[in-house]
Amino acid sequence: MRQTAADPGDVGPPLEPLDLAGRGPVIAVIVIDCVEHAVPMARALVEGGLSVLEVTLRTSAALGSIEAIARAVPEPLVGAGTLRNAADVRSAHAAGARFAVSPGYSGAVVSACRAMALPLVPGVATASEVMRAADDGFRFLKFFPASAAGGPALLRAWASPFADIVFCPTGGIGIDNAPAWLALPNVEVVGGSWLTPADALAARDWPRLTRLAREASALRP
Ligand code: 3PG
């Protein structure tokens, strides 16, 4: 699959999904309820050292938030998560998402991302899905839901048969168990929502987000 932007003027400089792995150690997975929170939230996370933000399409504020961040906060790579179908991909692309993440492996999502030249990190939870994704040319996959689907032991077991695949585990990861994931040979970056707690967003507690981001950035000096 072609995963670089065909028209750099349209979606920004070409971006291979693996670039995301190099911008770790943590991708912020964000559920946002209020577009007004988007820009100060992104600035707070960037101040704490994060550079990849995944805004999940789980709320009505998500697309507007992606648009606002893309427009006002140039430093981070902002992408869209929880893409479940082609319409989600089109909406994310139109909002200015620089990359796409899906919770599972969907041919429709893969085709739509290919049509939009939008880099995709597809989700997998089984060996068969890894094989299908690898057949389609993907080498950087989201492992979801990471803790429930088998934890670090499962990814360790996959390191041998899928030695050419790098995973971004998400789902059930926090500051305490992130080091165990990051120690795996096939993990360069983890994802998690712990950096943007709902109560901190509601309270507009931006310094708390910066502290959480700083702590996460220090996971890999
Ligand atoms: C995701 O979409 O990656 C997950 O919902 C994040 O999982 P978490 O909320 O357990 O970090």
Image (cartoon, rainbow, N blue to C red):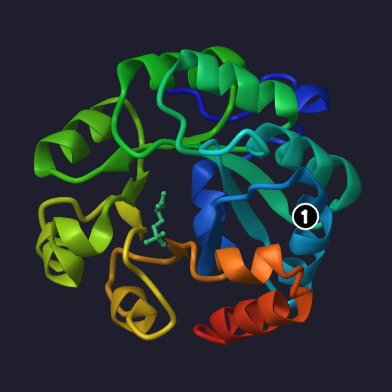
Q: Residue at x 75, y 59 (%)?
A: 42
Q: Kindly identify the amino acid type of the residue bearing the numbered disc 1.
A: His
**Is residue 196 in sight in this rendering?**
no
Q: Label 1, on which residue?
A: 37
- Quadrant containing ligand 1 reads bottom left
Q: Residue at x 18, y 67 (%)?
A: 151
Nearest the eye: 41 or 18: 41
Residue 105: image quadrant is top left
Residue 8: image quadrant is top right
Q: Residue at x 49, y 62 (%)?
A: 193
* Depicted 53 relative to depicted 176: above or below: above
* Depicted 141 relative to depicted 174: above or below: above
Can you name the residue that lies furthest to the right here? 72
Q: Position of residue 208 (x, y in %)?
A: 69, 81
Q: Position of residue 199 (x, y in %)?
A: 60, 69
Nearest the eye: 2 or 152: 152
Q: Secondary structure at mark 1?
A: helix
**Is residue 151 in sight in this rendering?**
yes
Q: Is residue 177 left or right of residue 95?
A: left
**Image quarter (top left, top right, bottom left or bottom right) of the C terminus:** bottom right
Q: Position of residue 156 (x, y in %)?
A: 15, 68
* Depicted 206 relative to depicted 23: above or below: below
Q: Is residue 26 left or right of residue 188?
A: right
* Depicted 131 relative to depicted 204: above or below: above
Q: Position of residue 130 (x, y in %)?
A: 20, 40
